[in-house]
Image: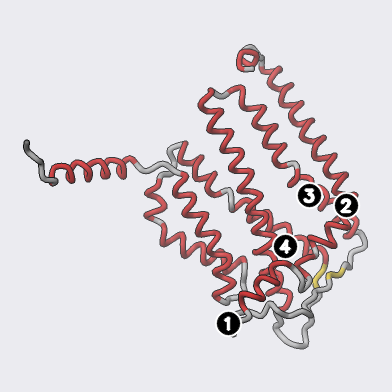
């Protein structure tokens, strides 16, 4: 494979890129058609799940918060938010666009594989081994982030905002477009946020980031993550805030282990070891 690509011209590489794009578009198109066919079931079962009291997160939070009086009440069996549509074409276009987003998520591993297949011939054997794990790790973290967004972040944000009332005279009426915009935004934002360890690793490989950065700016990161958690879940209670903050902070700490230590840190460790050896008593025979 490497020998064949060494003799490839610019137009050969361009042709290979063209077929990579064609295969990717075909995969997206096929999965979008399948998604379009089953989209009513997906809406009823998954997308509209957070609007009902039987959503899986609410059940677990009911057990966790029922014993503590000052925590939010998730045991309300009557909770149900009705989503309305006031635009004539919204349901049809949402059917199409959601099918595309679903296809993009389902084909994400294949798209990563196509990218890998295109760039791998230009890499050395040791680079291939490391980059292969990078693509795999990034794909897994993206799906974990989307899952956290769907099962945790969006339901808690939606439940608070949909039940919040400035006045009892004002009744919340949530449109389909508003619901789906927030649904897709929060889920994909969490998928991107969970790529933080991968981004940190790449910056470390380029020599732009080292482990001392996390040690130096840990306090700043904690404050920033608390602010971000408060923006994502504006309920204000410590329980909801901590539910979002803890995964984000764990990502920060995971990113720390993904980067190289600073040269100064390595030198200091070696100096400390030499001082310990000099200070330690020598046994004479």
State the quadrant of the N terminus.
top right
**Residue topped by disc 2:** 38
Measured in 3D between alpha carbons, the distance from the residue under mark 4 to the one under mark 2, in whole angstroms, is 22 Å
Which sits earlier in the primary sequence, circle 4 or circle 2? 2
Measured in 3D between alpha carbons, the distance from the residue under mark 4 to the one under mark 3, in whole angstroms, is 16 Å
Which sits earlier in the primary sequence, circle 4 or circle 3? 3
**Residue topped by disc 4:** 182
Which sits earlier in the primary sequence, circle 1 or circle 2? 2
Of residues 127 and 92, the one nearer the viewer is: 127
Tell me residue 96's x, y (percent).
86, 51
Q: Is residue 154 left or right of residue 49?
A: left
**Residue topped by disc 3:** 102
Measured in 3D between alpha carbons, the distance from the residue under mark 1 to the one under mark 3, in whole angstroms, is 38 Å
**Mark 1 burial class by Cα count in 10 Å: few <14, some 14-19, many 20+:** few
Disc ID at residue 219: none
Residue for point 65% across, 72% down: 61
Residue for point 64% across, 43% down: 139
Measured in 3D between alpha carbons, the distance from the residue under mark 2 to the one under mark 3, in whole angstroms, is 11 Å
Up-down relation of residue 88 to residue 12 (above or below): below
Q: Cβ–Cβ below 8 Å for labels 4 and 3?
A: no
Which sits earlier in the primary sequence, circle 2 or circle 3? 2
Q: Cβ–Cβ below 8 Å for labels 1 and 3?
A: no
């Amino acid at each position: 494979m490497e020998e064949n690509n060494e003799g490839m011209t610019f137009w050969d590489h361009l042709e290979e890129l063209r077929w990579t794009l064609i295969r990717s578009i075909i995969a997206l198109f096929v999965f979008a058609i399948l998604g379009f066919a089953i989209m009513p079931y997906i809406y009823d079962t998954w997308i509209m799940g957070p609007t009902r009291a039987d959503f899986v997160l609410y059940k677990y939070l009911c057990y966790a918060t029922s014993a503590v009086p000052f925590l939010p009440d998730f045991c309300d069996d009557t909770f149900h938010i009705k989503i309305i549509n006031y635009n004539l074409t919204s349901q049809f276009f949402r059917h199409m666009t959601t099918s595309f987003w679903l296809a993009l998520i389902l084909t994400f591993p294949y798209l990563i594989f196509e990218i890998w297949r295109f760039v791998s011939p230009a890499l050395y054997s040791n680079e291939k081994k490391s980059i292969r794990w990078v693509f795999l790790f990034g794909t897994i973290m993206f799906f974990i982030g989307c899952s956290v967004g769907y099962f945790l972040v969006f339901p808690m944000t939606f439940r608070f905002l949909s039940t919040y009332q400035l006045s009892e005279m004002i009744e919340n009426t949530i449109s389909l477009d508003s619901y789906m915009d927030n649904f897709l935004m929060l889920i994909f934002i969490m998928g991107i946020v969970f790529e933080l360890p991968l981004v940190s690793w790449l910056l470390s490989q380029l020599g732009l980031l080292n482990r001392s950065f996390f040690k130096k700016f840990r306090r700043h990161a904690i404050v920033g993550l608390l602010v971000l958690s408060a923006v994502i879940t504006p309920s204000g209670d410590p329980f909801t805030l901590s539910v979002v903050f803890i995964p984000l902070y764990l990502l920060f700490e995971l990113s720390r282990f993904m980067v190289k230590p600073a040269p100064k840190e390595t030198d200091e460790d070696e100096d400390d070891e030499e001082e310990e050896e000099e200070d330690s008593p020598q046994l004479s025979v």
